[in-house]
């Protein structure tokens, strides 16, 4: 056995009951099966089992709900039920609290509702985290309901009893029939545009067909995105519509919607009276404490003879003045001594600075003389080096000129122009010099370079010489 603390049976069953009843999927669930073990004690509440070929589950249908069933069920009947899954705590038994019953085969609306409910649940439209909190003291309330209906009358009566301070704005609309869903949507849009503190959407009880307009997907989605908190009171306690799931608060009846939306004036007045008494007591306590403090101060010796307070301080002031005068004389004496010391210091500093100045002048004169001598020596050395450099450069230039003249004579001796002056010429084929007849063919155009010009010719024939 583990060290985990054991739970009571009642606590476990209550936990399971809360989990089941808190699951939106298990509200208004549709179940089809066969009735068995039907019991109707005193013709009021119905107790029976719903079964198929594989399982069965207990059911209870209270008198407030079974009054709307338009046939008398019996064992063996196949029916379609709508209800909430719960647990009967005394027996620890799972059961369905049935809100509506129809003969099997007429449950198309129930099936549509169940599929649409699962779709919106999966999209998060029933998420409690999205629900907006209601204002604590709403003073501007919108009512969307049918005109001249019992639901409207219940709302007005309850609102007048509980919270007559609020201002009510009505948006009447049909709440039954084919066109009702669109009209309700228009009324909700107008109420949303009115910037009210809270909106009540109410209707009395009826069959699933009567309440079907409140299962409209567009209407449910609009309620989900509204900025104004919405409280629904549609049908009876067992009736759940898509508008109830997407609204911020769901009440079991129109009267319950008012009770959830507004506080009770008498309770609020009682709370305010308590706050007033508590505040009055607190203020009185502070006043009494301040009075006691004031009486304590009034008995103080200084308040009876205030000159005592000033006499003591006057004596202390006189003593401080005497002490200050003594310290002033001391400061003046020390200031005189300090001036004498400073005078001696300034005299010694002046004498020493004159000696240092004379020494610096002598040193500067010696340094100038040494620098001048050094400059003269360097200038003489630089002039000597310049003369040597000029002589060497002139000699080197003469040698270079002689060498250049010799090379010019050599180039002139080997120049093709000299050869041409003796009667020779140079033959070109294009840009290339021709040195052999193998390089030309008949009808080639050639350029002949002579000493004083060019001759353009064409090869008529060629003959190779041997020797």
Image (tube, grey):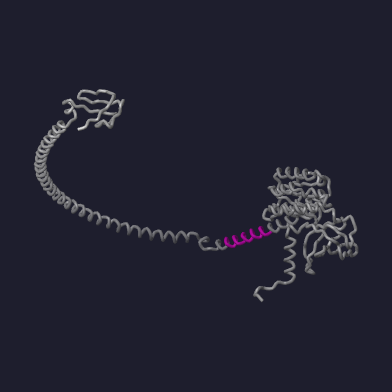
* Viewer-closest of 63 and 450: 450
* Viewer-closest of 165 and 211: 211
Q: Is residue 123 left or right of residue 352?
A: right
Q: Is residue 248 left or right of residue 64?
A: left
Q: Is residue 34 left or right of residue 249?
A: right
The residue located at (41%, 61%) in the rendering is: 316
**In which quadrant will I find the C terminus?**
top left
Q: Is residue 405 left or right of residue 158?
A: left
Residue 287: percent from left, percent from top: 62, 59
User: What is the tally of numbered marks visible in this picture?
Assistant: 0
Residue 1: percent from left, percent from top: 66, 76
Residue 392 in sight: yes
Residue 262 in sight: no
Magenta-span inclusion, residue 237? no
Magenta-span inclusion, residue 283? yes
- The secondary structure that dominates the magenta segment is helix
Which residues are drawn in magenta? Answer: 277-294
* Viewer-closest of 451 and 214: 451
- Farthest residue in the front direction? 466
Q: Is residue 301 above or below residue 415?
A: below
The residue located at (77%, 43%) in the rendering is: 182
Residue 284: percent from left, percent from top: 64, 59
Q: Quadrant of residue 173?
A: top right
Q: Is residue 31 above or below residue 424?
A: below
Residue 373: percent from left, percent from top: 9, 45
Q: Is residue 434 above or below residue 162?
A: above
């Amino acid at each position: 056995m583990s060290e985990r603390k054991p739970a009571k049976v009642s606590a476990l069953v209550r936990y399971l009951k809360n989990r089941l009843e808190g699951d939106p999927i298990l509200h208004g669930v549709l179940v089809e099966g066969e009735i068995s073990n039907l019991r109707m004690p005193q013709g009021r509440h119905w107790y029976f089992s719903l079964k198929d070929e594989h399982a069965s589950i207990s059911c209870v249908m209270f008198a407030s709900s079974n009054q709307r069933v338009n046939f008398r069920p019996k064992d063996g009947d196949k029916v379609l039920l709508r209800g909430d899954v719960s647990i009967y705590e005394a027996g620890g038994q799972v059961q369905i609290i049935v809100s509506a019953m129809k003969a099997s085969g007429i449950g198309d609306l129930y099936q549509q509702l169940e599929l649409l409910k699962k779709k919106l649940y999966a999209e998060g439209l029933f998420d409690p985290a999205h629900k907006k909190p209601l204002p604590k003291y709403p003073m501007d309330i919108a009512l969307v309901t049918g005109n001249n209906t019992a639901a409207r009358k219940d709302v007005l009566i309850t609102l007048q009893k509980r919270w007559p301070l609020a201002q009510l704005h009505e948006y009447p609309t049909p709440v039954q029939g084919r066109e009702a869903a669109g009209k309700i949507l228009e009324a909700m849009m107008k109420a949303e545009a009115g910037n009210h503190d809270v909106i009540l959407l109410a209707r009395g009880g009826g069959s699933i067909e009567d309440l079907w307009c409140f299962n409209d997907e567009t209407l449910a989605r609009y309620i989900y995105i509204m900025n104004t908190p919405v409280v629904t009171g549609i049908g009876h306690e067992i009736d759940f519509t898509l508008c109830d799931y997407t609204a911020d608060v769901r009440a079991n009846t129109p009267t319950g919607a008012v009770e959830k939306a507004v506080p009770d004036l008498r309770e609020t007045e009682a709370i305010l009276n308590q706050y007033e008494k508590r505040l009055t007591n607190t203020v009185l306590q502070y006043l009494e404490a301040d009075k006691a403090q004031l009486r304590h101060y009034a008995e103080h010796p200084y308040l009876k003879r205030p000159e005592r307070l000033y006499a003591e301080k006057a004596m202390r002031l006189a003593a401080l003045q005497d002490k200050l005068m003594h310290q002033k004389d001391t400061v003046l004496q020390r200031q005189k001594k300090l001036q004498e010391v400073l005078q001696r210091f300034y005299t010694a500093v002046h004498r020493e600075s004159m000696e240092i100045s004379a020494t610096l002048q002598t040193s500067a004169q010696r340094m100038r003389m040494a620098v001048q001598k050094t400059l003269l020596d360097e200038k003489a050395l630089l002039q000597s080096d310049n003369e040597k450099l000029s002589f060497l450069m002139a000699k080197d230039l003469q040698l270079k000129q002689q060498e250049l003249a010799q090379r010019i004579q050599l180039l002139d001796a080997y120049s093709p122009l000299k050869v041409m002056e003796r009667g020779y010429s140079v033959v070109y084929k294009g840009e290339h010099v021709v040195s052999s007849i193998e390089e030309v063919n008949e009808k080639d155009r050639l350029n002949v370079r002579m000493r004083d010009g060019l001759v353009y010719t064409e090869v008529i024939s060629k003959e190779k010489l041997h020797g």
